[in-house]
């Protein structure tokens, strides 16, 4: 009886629920600075998606989820969370908070990719547990299963070795290149725009693997020039560096303008 009452409430609360679409190709904002006002600015500016980074972002879970909630006002901006680990508990909390996209770091083989997919989908496709607290905790589990995008981070030598088996995992929607960790793992310096030929080759192989399968190919890059190039190469979603680097770069430019003007006066 109690269960029926909860279901009835949930149906009413969620009526009119429209899952968001990840359109692509386009840009995704990488949010490391934990403030929902920034999330709103990224959506207003026209980013197709915002990635709330719970792996390296500087904020608590509560703030991260407030950032996700702000995106409910922006139907054209897709809310994504990078969890800190391929852990069903973390993933399901992010989904219950309203994330439509889940990215997990360091996916190294098909077994890990399958575990990631299973955490994101309700039975019979996965093992997601029922906990309707926010928008995407729809009463309609099929609708939720269809709406969620599951993305594996490809950022180790093992992932490149096992790339085909990872990309072939049913229910995995795409792959996301972490160029810095991938470079480190392949014995190169951690660069957002890697130049070592074997790293570039691994990145290209990942893009081609996604394109061949019609899956989402996502990449983090160091600047907007490389972002433009990456989109022209055929990546579906490109992250043009992170907000903390946009900020530090802008700050350095502003300070330099001040210094230059003062130099002229002395
Ligand atoms: C990496 O470069 O390793 C990343 O995870 C970027 O987000
Ligand atoms: Mg990484």
Image: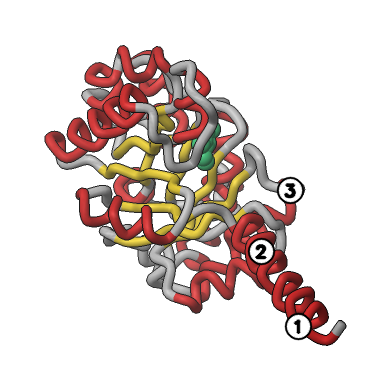
Q: Secondary structure at mark 1?
A: helix
* Observer-nearest of 20 and 210: 210
Does label 2 point to a residue whose CB lies under 8 Å from ligand 1? no
Q: Are marks 1 and 2 in contact (CB under 8 Å)?
A: no
Residue 240 relative to residue 90: left or right: left
Q: Earlier in the sequence, mark 1 or mark 2?
A: 2
Q: Are marks 2 and 3 in contact (CB under 8 Å)?
A: no
Residue at far right of view = 266
Q: Which residue is mark 1?
A: 261
Mark 2 Cα shell of 10 Å, populated few (<14), some (14-19), many (≥20)? few
Residue 247's tag is: 2
Image location (x, y in percent) of residue 23: 27, 61
Q: Earlier in the sequence, mark 2 or mark 3?
A: 3
Identify the residue at horizontal 21%, vertical 49% (top origin): 233
Is 232 rendered above or below residue 14? above
Q: Residue 75 is drawn in which quadrant? A: bottom left
Mark 3 Cα shell of 10 Å, populated few (<14), some (14-19), many (≥20)? some
Q: Which residue is mark 3?
A: 58
Q: Residue 35 is drawn in which quadrant? A: bottom right
């Amino acid at each position: 009886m109690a269960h029926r009452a909860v279901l009835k409430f949930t149906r009413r609360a969620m009526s009119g629920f429209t899952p968001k679409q990840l359109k692509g190709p386009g840009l995704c904002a990488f949010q490391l600075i934990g403030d929902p006002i920034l999330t709103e600015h990224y959506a207003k500016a026209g980013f197709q998606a915002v990635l709330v980074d719970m792996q390296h972002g500087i904020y608590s879970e509560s703030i991260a989820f407030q950032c996700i909630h702000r995106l409910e006002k922006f139907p054209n901006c897709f809310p994504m969370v990078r969890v800190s680990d391929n852990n069903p508990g973390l993933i399901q909390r992010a989904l219950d908070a309203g994330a439509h996209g889940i990215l997990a770091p360091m996916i190294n083989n098909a077994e890990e990719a399958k575990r990631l997919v299973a955490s994101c989908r309700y039975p019979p496709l996965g093992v997601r547990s029922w906990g309707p607290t926010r928008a995407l905790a729809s009463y309609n589990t099929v609708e939720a299963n269809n709406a969620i995008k599951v993305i594996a981070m490809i950022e180790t030598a093992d992932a490149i070795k096992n790339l085909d088996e990872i990309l072939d995992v049913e229910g995995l929607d795409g792959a996301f290149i972490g160029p810095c960790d991938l470079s480190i793992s392949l014995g190169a310096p951690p660069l957002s725009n890697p130049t070592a030929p074997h790293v570039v080759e691994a990145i290209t192989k990942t893009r081609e693997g996604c394109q061949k399968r019609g899956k989402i190919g996502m990449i983090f890059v160091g600047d907007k020039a490389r972002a433009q190039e990456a989109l022209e190469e055929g990546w579906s979603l490109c992250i043009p560096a992170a907000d903390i680097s946009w900020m530090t770069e802008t700050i350095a430019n502003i300070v330099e303008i001040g210094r230059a003007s003062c130099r002229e006066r002395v």
